[in-house]
Amino acid sequence: MPLIRLLHTADIHLDSPLRSLALRNEDLRTTVEAATRAAFSRLIDFAMSEQVTALLIAGDLFDGKQRSARTAAFLTGQLDRLRAAEIRVFYIKGNHDAENPITGSLDLPDNVHVFDARGGKVQLSAELWIHGVSFADRHAPESLLPRFPEPVAGAVNIAMLHTSLAGAAGHDTYAPCHIADLVGMGFDYWALGHIHKRQVHSESPWIVMPGMPQGRDIGEAGPKSASLLTIENGTITVEEVPTSVVDFTQTALDVTEADSDDALRSLLRAHLEAVCAGITAQTAVLRLTLTGQSPRYWQILRDQDVWQETIADLAQMAGRLWIDKLVFDLAAPEARTGAVSATDELSRTMLDIASESGFNAVARAKIDTVLQDLPAALRARLIPDEAAAEALTHELAQSGAYRVLARMKGAES
């Protein structure tokens, strides 16, 4: 069997809307909003440069009900590039594709084979078969394994499936099955999709969830990739291929040793330079959490706005790095023994008041007044239920008390 290369990807979510980033820079916002397209283009570039035989797309090429003629035109153009290079494409529909209106009407180039919900197989070469089953609609509560045809004897058999497997945090259940079920089916490689985090579940046979080619927000942090299969003499080897053009990342920095503003700036600068050195994408968006028990606790809380701007400037100097959010998760210094200051007394009083039912009722009424000015959809996201409303009231009261205390205590030293 001659050497054959295949590229396996999934969960592209073309033109998925930006969901939760607080990006103030317009150029960066534009870059992030176009990232799913740019990553897909990078994937196509790689397929052509490596002269792969086929691209396998294991579901969720589109993003739910998002309808766009521009998305369709972009996709067709990219697939046409593969056709010109004589690269075939095999595509199964996932839950997002099944609810997308484009997928039912789009006339894809003739190098693309879309498996239907009944399941089927296609011969790619004399000794290589591709099998696949698409979602019929956005819900697939039952296993799709019974719809797969039997592997072809004496050949290498690749099976494409969009599945939540036995379940994963943050993902609904779709086409459930267990790793043992897949192992027992007799295929040589399972090209999976649906879970956005890369994981190789087995190497004999290969059972690979490639992750997604591009994260869409800080909740999908880390470098993203696809899988390159090399098949030679019936043996499959797999390599991870970087694909993301924007990396989202979350890190924590212990600032316990920062006993001055200059020391804190030095810690931040070194941390950001280290993060920047580890970036594999063109750009990275960072959410940084400050931790530890710094002697400058109250001054840092007092000057949060200053530190927000400082770290944004330091990130720009580090290069290719942007700040999504700076989170303060610091521990207050241990209370001094001896006399209790007036500020300490006021601190206890404020925190006691913040926990009183009467204060909470007034605070809740004010919060409700502000929320009424927000769009209903945003209101529902912020306050999905009564427990969330109570939690927000408590959080704001505590935060307000600490901000006032930070101003007073920060001026004491």
Image: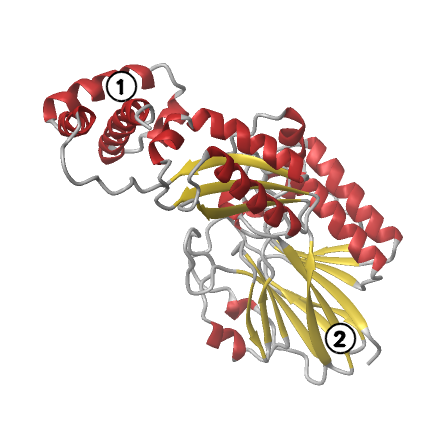
Mark in the foreground, 2 or 1: 1
State the residue at coordinates (60%, 30%): 313
Name the spot of residue 104 as percent of width and height, x first. 64, 43
Left or right: residue 147 compared with residue 127: left
Quarter of the image with the N terminus in it: bottom right
Tell which circle, 2 or 1, labels the residue nearer the N-terminal end.
2
Quarter of the image where one finds residue 246: top right
**Is 285 placed above or below 377 here?**
below
Instruction: Name the residue beneath numbered marker 2.
Output: 231
Taking the view exactly as shown, the residue that stands out farthest to the front is 338
Q: Amino acid at mark 1?
A: Asp
**Is 52 placed above or below 385 here?**
below
Left or right: residue 279 compared with residue 47: left
Name the spot of residue 401 as percent of width and height, x first. 25, 25
Secondary structure at numbered mark 1: helix
Name the spot of residue 413 as percent of width and height, x first. 33, 28
State the residue at coordinates (44%, 63%): 176
Q: Amino acid at mark 2?
A: Ile
Instruction: Name the residue beneath numbered marker 1.
Output: 368
Between 86 and 406, the one nearer to me in the picture? 406
State the residue at coordinates (25%, 30%): 398
- Label placed on residue 103: none
Taking the view exactly as shown, the residue that stands out farthest to the bottom is 154
Between 198 and 62, the one nearer to me in the picture? 198
